[in-house]
Image (cartoon, helix red, strand yellow):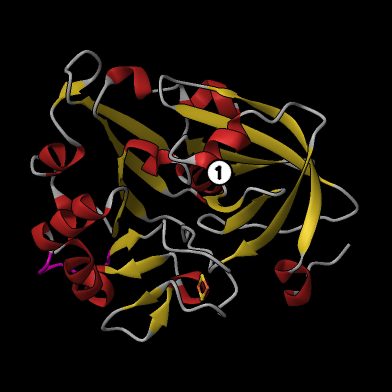
Amino acid sequence: MLESTRLRYIVKPARVIENKPISGSMHILRIELIRHSVEVEPFNFFNIWVPRVDEIPLSIAYADSKSLFFIYRIRGVGTKTLSQLKPGEFIGVKGPLGKGFKPLNNRRWLIVAGGVGIAPVPFLLSFAIKTNTKIDVIWGVKKSDEFFDLSNVFGLKQRGWRLIKVSEDCQDGLCGTALSVLNSVSINDYDVVLAIGPQQMLLSFCRMLKDRENVYVSLENMVKCGIGVCGSCYLKGSHKLLCIDGPVFKCSEVVDHLESSIS
Ligand code: FES
């Protein structure tokens, strides 16, 4: 069935196939749409409607011919209730929302992910494998039990990408933060540098690379309606909406917004 803008914006029924912890802090949700199919690109997101509780925006983590995958962390009542759903139960999904952002052939990308900011990365890596893009990923976490195995969970071939793990408890991978590793990387080797994670990390990232071109961040956590109606995702200083124009923006477009949100 062909996807249309109208179809994107309606809540579609879906069945839970799998919903379980994959690390000390993260869960994976796998669903199948009922009577619908959608085309998704890296960095699209969906609003997951947990009946009678909440609507939760989650980045697409992976997609195959039958199902959509999401990675999430329990942050409140909505995600807590989501984590309790069992295979076979029903939810609603609105999407794919936002603009995709995907690799072009033969380019070199660096991704800097903090914590659950890793969520959109597996699907991005699956595009890298298809398009000859080389992607290096720096994934930083506070506690090393937050890591999970990207290749195993999503069956990704270890081709065209490289993962550098860094933890603040120094129990797995390098010792420090994703940004401390970024400091020691030769940025000139990359055509695109993109960070995903908490706002403070994104602001520090943009300040570190403020003189460079092709430096991006993926924003999250501000979406309510997801379809450009409620205004809750308005980016101060840019006249853009995260849910329509994002979630990926150049640092120069969002640094004012990040500064005013954090101060
Ligand atoms: S989330 Fe409502 S306008 Fe973007």
Identify residue type, mark 1. Gly
The residue under the point 11% across, 38% down is 180
Residue 250: x and y, percent?
A: 30, 70
Residue 98: x and y, percent?
A: 54, 67
Numbered label tally: 1
Mark 1 neighbour density, 10 Å: few (under 14) some (14–19) many (20 or more): some
- The local secondary structure at tag 1 comes to helix
Residue furthest to the bottom in view is 239
Vertical comparison of 158 with 211: above or below: above
Q: Which residue is mark 1?
A: 78
The residue under the point 46% across, 29% down is 26
Q: Nearer the viewer, residue 133 or 255?
A: 255
The stretch in magenta equals 210-215
Tell me where residue 185 sits by quadrant. Answer: top left
| Image quarter hosting the C terminus | bottom left
Q: Nearer the viewer, residue 263 or 159?
A: 263
Q: Nearer the viewer, residue 215 or 84?
A: 84
Ligand 1 near label 1 (Cβ, under 8 Å)? no
**Left or right: 205 in relation to 16:** left
Residue 108: x and y, percent?
A: 33, 52
The residue under the point 63% across, 48% down is 53
Query: Is 251 one of the magenta-colored residues?
Result: no
**Left or right: 200 in relation to 232:** left
| Image quarter hosting the N terminus | bottom right
Q: Main secondary structure of the magenta part?
A: loop
